[in-house]
Amino acid sequence: MANQETFGRFSSCRGVSFEIKPHLDPFAIPTRVMNEPPRGSKRFWLPWGSSSKIVPSSAMLERTMSRASSHFCDLDLDDDEDDDDALRAIEEGHYEEEELKAIPLPLPPAKSKREQPPKPTKPKESRLSVILLDQGLFTVYKRLFVVCLALNITGLVLAAIGHFPYARNRAALFSIGNILALTLCRSEACLRVVFWLAVSVLGWSWVPLRLKTATTSLLQCLGGIHSGCGVSSVAWLVYALVLTLKDRDNTSPEIIAVASAILSLLSLSCLAAFPLVRHLHHNIFERTHRFAGWTSLGLLWAFIILTISYDPRTKSYSNELGSRLIKQQEFWLTVAITLLIIIPWLTVRRVPVKVSAPSGHASIIKFEGGVKSGILGRISPSPLSEWHAFGIISDGKQEHMMLAGAVGDFTKSLVSNPPSHLWVRQVHFAGLPYLTNMYDRVLLVATGSGICVFLSFLLQPCSADVCVLWVAKGIEQNFGKEIKEMMSGHPKEKVIVHDTAVLGRPNVSQMSVDAAKRWGAQVVIVTSNPEGSRDVVNSCKTAGIAAFGPIWDS
């Protein structure tokens, strides 16, 4: 395997990249019959998971307890060469579960290659179809995207056939309105308020559970509205530009040029956010989205000023701009968009940090100031190029910390070269874990460094009764005494820790279902790798328990 190229993969959380390195899943145990000669290295494509995978057709895929996967929440530390080779071959592997037998069964003598029946081959699927269908056809995310796009297309068609004259005369306004909506769906300050309102209004025992879970699904999948409005804004701007070109005698070449530039940048942003591109080239997506968005905003201001000040009768621009601007809806929508984009950057600060590395595989970053439970934060070594999101551990008093598994260039540098200062956004954002406060009894499931976002619920008062299930390898060796002590001193029915280095690799999905039933949980919230989260969520739903885990665009 020395000549095999290893590919970095990426996942995301609210537009923030996490580099994924191929490594062995802590919940799958490859086994090999003793003295069995190595098999051929033929490879075939498997159609499951969030990307196409290349998997060796060997006994390595036999007798597993759970599906293999790879993610920033995993922390597998095997140094065995065979395991490392297996991982590079099984990059985010995904195959059928089998129960391990307590007593090994005798195996029939190995057949020669001629005697062995031909192995069935899996149908090939493109990476595009894999990513688009990865989370199913009818997810809440996709429903929101379709509804948003359908409403806009309906309005566009009515405007084109003359039954919606307001939209026909103000097509650019509808494009700007969609941009405002998609900006709201990604504004961390606004979402912090929305999540707080959801918990405050629905966090009562008498509120129906169905309403709470529906709200959780909606808030988790706001990215569907964000992407739907993004595509719709492009469609409205194309329509506005077509109308302008038809009536070019009453406009100026400058207005047409600026509108065309905005359309090009918006289209580029949409293409960069396409699931296939975003999954395989996340850094390109993130930087394109950021810088193309900022440039588009500057051009939007130029477009509004030029449009409002242009007089088609005199073919010139008027100096009386102020009184006209404040009367235009486009102006106020653009003001709102600008404020929403600027606010997070006004809170960016370079702050001192204390970084310690309990092992070479994880680091603990400490900051001043207490933070409420369920909150996440962003840090960066270079604020214009990259931001990384982590769950926050805090007792709500004097300090808070982040636990970062060393899986990417940035997180590895925290271990090898700990910084004294980092850039932070002082407006922390609320994510799925924050909605724990909406329920009465909750099971929190985490693997690896995913535990960090749940620890705060044990360290400070919480309106919900929570039970924490943590599956990781080498708790004290890899995460340090401090993290271990935070998990200690709680009733055994409230905190379940499974150290795979001691107890072996479990079936996390079944463990979650059993723990949820014992705890009487209304909902299960899981933070694991994409496939691990999906398995837990599906198993819980099959058992009739509401469950939520991070999605690729949450």
Image (cartoon, rainbow, N blue to C red):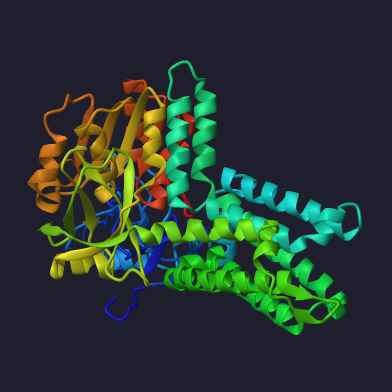
Q: Is residue 50 visible?
A: no
Residue at 80% over, 51% down: 154
Q: Please state the horizontal and vertical placement of residue 135, each as a whole percent of the image.
A: 53, 50
Residue 539 vertical position relative to residue 431 in the rendered view, above or below: above
* Residue that extends furthest to the bottom in the rendered view of this protein: 253
Residue 8 vertical position relative to residue 499 in the rendered view, above or below: below
Residue 62 vertical position relative to residue 274 in the rendered view, above or below: above
Q: Please state the horizontal and vertical placement of residue 421, each as a whole percent of the image.
A: 18, 65
Residue at 50% over, 66% down: 278
Please state which of residues 96 and 317 is positioned toward the viewer in this rendering.
Answer: 317
Please state which of residues 495 and 373 is positioned toward the viewer in this rendering.
Answer: 373
Q: Please state the horizontal and vertical placement of residue 529, each as a whole percent of the image.
A: 36, 51
Answer left or right for 552 relative to 165: left
Residue 422 picture quarter? bottom left
Q: Is residue 480 visible?
A: yes
* Residue that extends furthest to the top in the rendered view of this protein: 206
Residue at 28% over, 67% down: 408
Q: Please state the horizontal and vertical placement of residue 532, each as a whole percent of the image.
A: 38, 47
Residue 24 picture quarter? bottom left
Answer left or right for 115 relative to 23: right
Answer left or right for 65 relative to 394: right
Please state which of residues 241 and 122 is positioned toward the viewer in this rendering.
Answer: 241
Q: How many marks?
A: 0
- Quadrant occupied by the N terminus: bottom left
* Residue that extends furthest to the left in the rendered view of this protein: 481
